[in-house]
Amino acid sequence: MTARLCFSSLTSLPNPPSISSSSSCTRVHPNLISFKLPSRFRSRNADRRRSYQTAATLTVDSQTSGEKTLETVPPRVLLEVKNLTAIVAESRQEILRGVNLTINEGEVHAIMGKNGSGKSTFSKAIIIFWVSLEVLVGHPDYEVTGGTVSFKGEDLLNMEPETRSHAGLFMSFQTPVEIPGVSNMDFLLMACNARREKRGEPTLSPIEFFGFLSPKLAAVNMNPRFLDRNVNEGFSGGEKKRNEILQLAVLEAELAILDEIDSGLDVDALQDVAKAVNGLLTPHNSILMITHYQRLLDYIKPNYVHIMEAGAIVRTGDISLAKQLEKEGYRAISSA
């Protein structure tokens, strides 16, 4: 019996994330940011990419019957959250009450909810102790009190902060931190080489890194002069958000958690950021967006939209759920 590996396109299923087909068996370098299609194809193919996901199938030839059978390879799970609960460390107030979520590779998810519903707390619980959030961005620390979170099959909650980053997890903050005295160039080069070392890849010299970085700068519409400036110091809101997406492009993370990247952006800046994020999407990485507004989802199309209320995900659907929310408000879809 012989086996051949081939690929087929399958439409995204409207079922819950845990059973969608969105995986491939062949590893492809995730940096597609500098690739541009002719304008007459760009919009149509962008829609097609969001409507179809790649699935690997194994074609098996039987030497006795000559018949062929197809077996779809299950999607690789990147993030799996089971019954996650958390409290505010200082006040001991319960803020997450049993969050469940599965994200497969090649998927885009969006979490929406009212202020205080637990959206950003959920993201910080996943990245808990990534940095001292209380010191750097003014948020209290959160303590996980129950449940499990796994990333690529490993226990995420027991990983050190740098281990999570090296494993391919990235988080964009609502308020990106400023780092005086550290240039963007030095910061990005050190972060890139640390990730490459963990992947067993050769590190880049400053000259090699600049060649690697140049198309990514163009993709987020950033002037190379920003590399000489200290990280986020004196940056406008739009420049900070562009800089975070530049960091995401450099690190080539497999799962990016984007916490309100549309906050404070005008239309032009939002389009630049969304274009760069879409350029980073491949069948092998995923995005979890956290937002209040449906307008972000007009630019970065999600496969799944989750509504969070009272510290738990209460509804899951597709983009139509976000449009219903925009039209009717949270009261119309509240679980209460």
Image (cartoon, grey):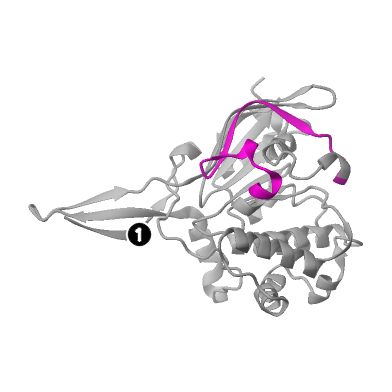
Q: Which quadrant, please, contains the C terminus?
A: top right
In screen coordinates, is 204 left or right of 139? left
Count numbered badges in the picture: 1
On the image, the x and y values in percent for residue 93 come to 79, 22
The residue lying at 71 percent from left, 61 percent from top is: 191
The residue at which mark 1 appears reads as 7
The residue lying at 7 percent from left, 53 percent from top is: 64
- Asked which quadrant contains residue 124, the reply is top right
- Magenta-drawn stretch contains 157: yes
Q: Pick the residue in front: 262 or 253.
A: 253
Examine the rendering and report whether any part of residue 40 can be seen.
yes
- Asked which quadrant contains residue 119, the reply is top right
Q: Pick the residue in front: 255 or 145.
A: 145
In screen coordinates, is 57 left or right of 328? left
Examine the rendering and report whether any part of residue 168 can be seen.
no
23, above or below 196, in the image: above
- Magenta-drawn stretch contains 222: no
On the image, the x and y values in percent for residue 167 come to 60, 51
Single out the residue that lies furthest toward the top: 336
Numbered range of the magenta stretch: 136-164
The residue lying at 64 percent from left, 34 percent from top is: 307
Residues packed near mark 1 inside 10 Å, few (<14), some (14 to 19) or many (20 plus): some
Q: Pick the residue in front: 228 or 204.
A: 204
In screen coordinates, is 323 left or right of 46? right
On the image, the x and y values in percent for residue 271 come to 71, 62
169, above or below 202, in the image: above
Check disc 1 and report its element: helix, strand or loop.
strand
Residue type marked 1: Phe
Q: Which quadrant, please, contains the N terminus?
A: bottom left
- Asked which quadrant contains residue 204, the reply is bottom right
On the image, the x and y values in percent for residue 230 come to 87, 65
